């Protein structure tokens, strides 16, 4: 998976217990791009670094809707979890200290889907991340009208 | 380093970490078109959105009646709650009309939730959760108005404009079709309507400059059967009501975001259409703007619009006309009743759209007037850039989408009334796809408001009784064979009225405002009243004075105490 640095924020917002008590969700995080495997499935990996209260990358980009195989790694010295979006039901994964697991997600797109660790106040302190699905709605669903201006 | 990790395996469905049973009895397997057509013959069930195709929201069940309703008490409560981060966390609302088939309830929530519940105990049998993009364009909150059932499937639309068929026994998705373009500002909130072998849905997005449409899909396969646009292209019938040049028609709105009714004998569906886009800036769309703010009579077999009746030609008040068309017969004549946002209710001949009667149903109507022949005369409307205008009813209307009811026992129509005005300031803006396209600033009054549940005689247009409230009534009404009318308040009370007098006979404080459609059913001879409770949605439009009402997410079910 390729990763790039997101736009940085004001000082202290991307560090736990500096400017604020936790860290601003997604602030200062990295962008990761899911890789498309020959079978058409997309694959990405996110991890929780030690004492950073962040998913890294904090934005996972899917080039189109479909299935995403997501690997999740907890390198932190505290237990977390992941509640992940997927058609059918949320997917849940415990992430004890130094653990790794996987999730299979089905997402329509386009649009932005959030996932988070839903124990304690992990969400409030920064363990929120996004899966961003690119692309357009399928042609058969679009409006019969001339192309329209977009922002 | 890989060896030092604990392998926690694969993520599991969140529902496996709950008390969900995982399956429901096969009660929907035999729900056919004929059964839905004869829905009132099995009053123990609530088989379709309005209870029956006629949209009366009436049940013959009479175990709970004017004599014993004071003993009504909660039987069970289902609470949905929320976890994680989702779209519209401040605007979600529990708006659905619960469907019940032979003891099993099927109900949708906000944000892609569908639940199958035991109708007697509230036990969660299965759940389905569609993943919804948090940035889905929504004018009016994270909502869904209900499901449809037939032939072993539960049908629901999603906010990101998919229509799904779920296995009614397991909740697993059987087919999934996209019927709208979220990048264009479209979404899905309507409760589907099953007619014959088709499931029919309308689109939302009238505040984003989309072009409204109805779509039909085959129940069994999901194959797309037809699409009908509610705004004609240049050259099509009705296109003469739009500017000849430019693309106003392509952004014209007219969405069908509230479920239609159906007359099997006439083979006609009655769908209301929404506001033209932009809502308030009429200068960019001169003309009557068909078929916005209209009743369209649609052939379910091919989607053809047979005839129409436009309630608000060239609407510049946001007076969507989606709301229910209640089918009833009077003196041998096939009629329908419709309460419009504009403060008037209409009785039409449903064979041809001829106006039979029009009368006001609210006290303050200042935007204009409609005479006995249906002639519309606008009086107050936004026309000058930056100049505020004030009118009643405000843009949420004297009645919003929430439904009226009709009791064949009393011959009366029962309507939830909102009496609240608004100040609208025209602000022209250029159209950009996916960006709200209102064309005005909107400030709905925070005080000087009122509401009621009012009963009207469709044969005269006269008001028969009124139960007055100090704030607007924003939830659907239910009428029953026990001569009761049920309606919830924004302050949380769920009320039962005497259908003949309007006397308040019973109420229960549910803890959150009502903006849903109560239904009734029976299991093993015990009658239940079900009402989703969860204040939200377009509160800034219909009642911003109650913005601070607790934001609930519960389904209450009431019954008489067991012996």
Image (spheres, coloured by chain):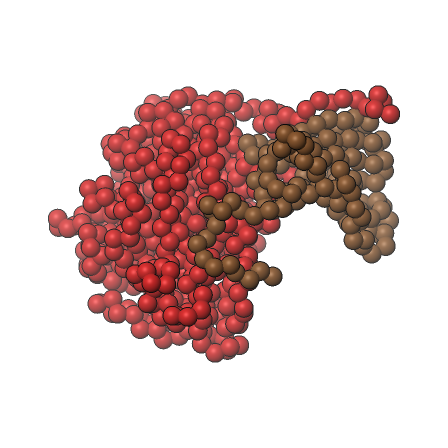
Residue B49 picture quarter: top left
Residue at the spot x=31%, y=43% of the render?
B57
- Check the image and report above or below for A67 versus B327: above
**Taking the image as drawn, is residue A42 in sight?**
yes
Nearer to me, B71 or B127: B127
Q: Position of residue A55 (x, y in %)?
A: 76, 39
Residue B507 picture quarter: top left
The single residue placed furthest to the front in the displayed view is A38
Q: Position of residue B275 (x, y in %)?
A: 41, 60
- Check the image and report above or below for B9 versus B173: above
In the rendered structure, the answer to whether residue B253 lies left or right of residue B132 reads left
Q: Which chain is brown?
A: A
Residue at the spot x=46%, y=29% of the render?
B174
Residue at the spot x=33%, y=28% of the render?
B31
The single residue placed furthest to the left in the displayed view is B332
- So how many labels did they put on this image? 0
Q: Position of residue B469 (x, y in %)?
A: 41, 56
Residue B1 picture quarter: top right
Indicate the colour of chain B: red
**Taking the image as drawn, is residue B544 in sight?**
no
Nearer to me, B11 or B185: B185
- Check the image and report above or below for B240 versus B476: below
In the rendered structure, the answer to whether residue A109 lies left or right of residue B505 reads right
In the rendered structure, the answer to whether residue A66 lies left or right of residue B237 reads right
Residue at the spot x=52%, y=30% of the render?
B127
Q: Quadrant of the C terminus of chain B?
A: top left
Q: Position of residue B246 (x, y in %)?
A: 44, 69
């Amino acid at each position: 998976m390729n990763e790039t640095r997101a736009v940085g924020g004001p000082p202290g917002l991307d560090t736990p217990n500096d400017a604020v008590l936790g860290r601003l969700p997604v602030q200062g995080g990295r962008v990761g791009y899911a890789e498309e495997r020959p079978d058409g499935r997309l694959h990405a990996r996110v991890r929780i670094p030690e004492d950073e209260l962040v998913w890294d990358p904090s934005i996972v980009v899917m080039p189109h809707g479909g299935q995403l195989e997501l690997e999740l790694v907890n390198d932190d010295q505290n237990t977390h979890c992941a509640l992940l979006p997927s058609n059918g039901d949320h997917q849940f994964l415990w992430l004890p200290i130094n653990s790794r697991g996987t999730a299979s997600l089905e997402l329509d797109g386009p649009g932005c889907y959030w996932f988070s660790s839903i124990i304690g106040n992990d969400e409030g302190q920064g363990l929120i991340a996004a899966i961003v699905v690119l692309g357009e709605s399928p042609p058969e669903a679009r409006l019969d009208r001339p192309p329209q201006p977009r922002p | 380093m890989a060896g030092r990790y604990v392998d926690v395996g694969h993520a599991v469905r969140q529902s496996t970490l709950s008390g969900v049973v995982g399956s429901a009895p096969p009660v929907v397997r035999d729900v056919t078109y004929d059964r839905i057509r004869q829905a009132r013959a099995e009053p123990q069930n609530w088989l379709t959105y309005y209870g029956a195709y006629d949209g009366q929201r009436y049940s013959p069940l009479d175990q709970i009646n004017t004599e014993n309703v004071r003993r009504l008490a909660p039987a069970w409560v289902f609470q949905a709650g929320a976890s994680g981060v989702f779209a519209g966390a401040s605007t979600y609302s529990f708006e659905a009309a619960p469907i019940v088939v032979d003891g099993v309830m099927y109900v949708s929530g906000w944000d892609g939730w569908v639940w199958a519940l035991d109708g007697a105990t509230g036990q969660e049998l299965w759940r389905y959760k569609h993943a919804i993009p948090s940035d889905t364009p929504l004018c009016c909150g994270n909502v869904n108005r209900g499901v449809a059932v037939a032939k072993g499937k539960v049908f629901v639309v999603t906010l990101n404009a998919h229509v799904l068929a779920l296995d009614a026994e397991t909740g697993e998705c059987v087919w999934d079709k996209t019927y709208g373009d979220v990048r264009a500002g479209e979404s899905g909130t309507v409760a589907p309507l099953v007619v014959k072998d088709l499931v029919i849905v309308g689109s939302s997005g009238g505040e984003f400059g989309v072009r409204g449409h109805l779509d039909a899909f085959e129940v069994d396969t999901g194959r797309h059967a037809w699409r009908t646009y509610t705004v004609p292209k240049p050259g099509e019938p009705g296109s003469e009501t739009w500017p000849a040049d430019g693309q106003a028609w392509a952004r014209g709105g007219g969405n069908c975001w509230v479920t239609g009714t159906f007359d099997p004998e006439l083979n006609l569906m009655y769908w209301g259409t929404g506001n033209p886009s932009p809502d308030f800036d009429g200068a960019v769309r001169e003309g009557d703007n068909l078929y916005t703010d209209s009743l369209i009579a649609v052939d379910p077999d091919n989607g053809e619009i047979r005839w129409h009746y436009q309630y608000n030609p060239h609407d510049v008040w946001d007076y969507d006309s989606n709301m229910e068309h209640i089918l009833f017969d009077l003196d041998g004549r096939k009629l329908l009743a419709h309460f419009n946002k504009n403060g008037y209710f209409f009785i039409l001949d449903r064979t041809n759209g001829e106006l039979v009667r029009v009368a006001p149903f609210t006290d303050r109507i200042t935007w204009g007037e409609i005479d006995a022949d249906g002639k519309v005369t606008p009086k107050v409307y936004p026309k000058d850039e930056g100049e505020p205008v004030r009118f009643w009813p405000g843009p949420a209307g004297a009645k919003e989408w929430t439904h009226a009811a009709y009791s064949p026992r009393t011959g009366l129509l029962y309507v939830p009334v909102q009496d609240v005005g608004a100040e609208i300031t025209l602000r022209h803006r250029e159209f950009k796809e996916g960006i709200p396209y209102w064309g005005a600033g909107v400030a709905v009054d925070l005080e000087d408001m009122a509401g009621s549940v009012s009963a009207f005689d469709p044969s005269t247009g006269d008001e028969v009784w009124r139960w007055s409230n100090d704030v607007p009534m924003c939830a659907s009404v239910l009428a029953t064979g026990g001569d009761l009318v049920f309606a919830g308040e924004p302050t949380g009370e769920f009320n039962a009225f005497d259908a003949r007098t309007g006397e308040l006979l019973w109420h229960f404080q549910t803890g959150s405002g009502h903006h849903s459609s109560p239904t009734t059913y029976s299991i093993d001879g015990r009658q239940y009243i079900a009402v989703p409770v969860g204040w939200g949605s377009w509160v800034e439009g219909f009642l911003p004075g109650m913005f601070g009402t607790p934001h609930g997410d519960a389904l209450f079910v009431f019954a008489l105490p067991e012996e």
